[in-house]
Image: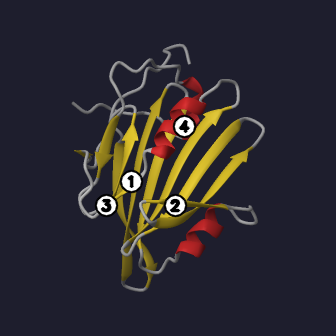
Amino acid sequence: AQHAVGSTPAQLDRIGPRTATSEWQRYKVEDEESSVLFPVTPAMSTKSVSYALNQNRRERTLAAYADGVVYLVATYEKKGLSFDDLVHAVIPGQKTGAVSVDGFSGKSLDHEDERNIWRRRFFETKKTLYQFVAVAAKVGDYSAGISKFLSSISFNKSPEGHRVIDGPGAQPVVHPDG
């Protein structure tokens, strides 16, 4: 069953720790070449974005929150957007590292600001650009969940996993007193 997520950036400070009641599971999206482990069923939103007169591309976001970490996968149809455009738009002026998964080369960025740690991985397939992101507050040790998420990234023409559709995903616990 799917439930409302309610994890917009403004609400993240009000969302408390959640203990996973089930094991991480692999999720995929129809017509995509990737799959990844999530600790809960992710929310998904697909939209058509105009990039030129009468030209649109599909952009998709999958996201989940569990145990103090936001996990996100953003995919972009390769129309009017290059891999370098995506990486430089997200992380202008930041130094990236090299990563490789299932024969696909990509870039990584591990970044920290005053409050959060960010781990990003970027990949390009024939049809799609991918951005995998894990974000957590610095106040805890979330390295195990972040590592599990990022190390589970997989590319395959017919990926394995539970199919995700547009919808709200699993709901985290929200403290009523805010």
Residue 169, horizontal then vertical, whole percent: 32, 37
Q: Hey, which quadrant is residue 1 in on the image?
A: top left
56 is higher (above) or lower (below) than 136 = below
> Do the residues bearing badges 2 and 1 touch, measured as CB atoms within 8 Å?
no
- What residue is rendered at 47% in x and 81% in y? 80
14 is higher (above) or lower (below) than 78 = above
Tell us which disc is closer to us: 4 or 3.
3
> Do the residues bearing badges 4 and 1 touch, measured as CB atoms within 8 Å?
no
Circle 2 SS class: strand
Give the mark, 2 or 1, whose residue is nearer the N terminus. 2
Give the mark, 3 or 2, whose residue is nearer the N terminus. 2
Tell us which disc is closer to us: 2 or 4.
2
Mark 2, Cα crowd under 10 Å, few <14 / some 14-19 / many 20+, is few
Gap between marks 4 and 1, in whole Å?
A: 15 Å
Q: What amino acid type should be assigned to the residue bearing mark 2?
A: Ser
Mark 1, Cα crowd under 10 Å, few <14 / some 14-19 / many 20+, is some
Query: Pointer 2: what residue?
Result: 100
Q: What amino acid type should be assigned to the residue bearing mark 1?
A: Ser
Query: Pointer 1: what residue?
Result: 154
Residue 34, horizontal then vertical, whole percent: 35, 57
Residue 45, horizontal then vertical, whole percent: 35, 52
Residue 93, horizontal then vertical, whole percent: 76, 66
Query: Pointer 4: what residue?
Result: 146
Would residue 168 be seen by someone viewing this image from the given angle?
Answer: no
- What residue is rendered at 35% in x and 18% in y? 21
Query: Pointer 3: what residue?
Result: 156
> Do the residues bearing badges 4 and 3 touch, measured as CB atoms within 8 Å?
no
Give the mark, 4 or 1, whose residue is nearer the N terminus. 4
Gap between marks 2 and 1, in whole Å?
A: 10 Å
Q: What amino acid type should be assigned to the residue bearing mark 3?
A: Asn
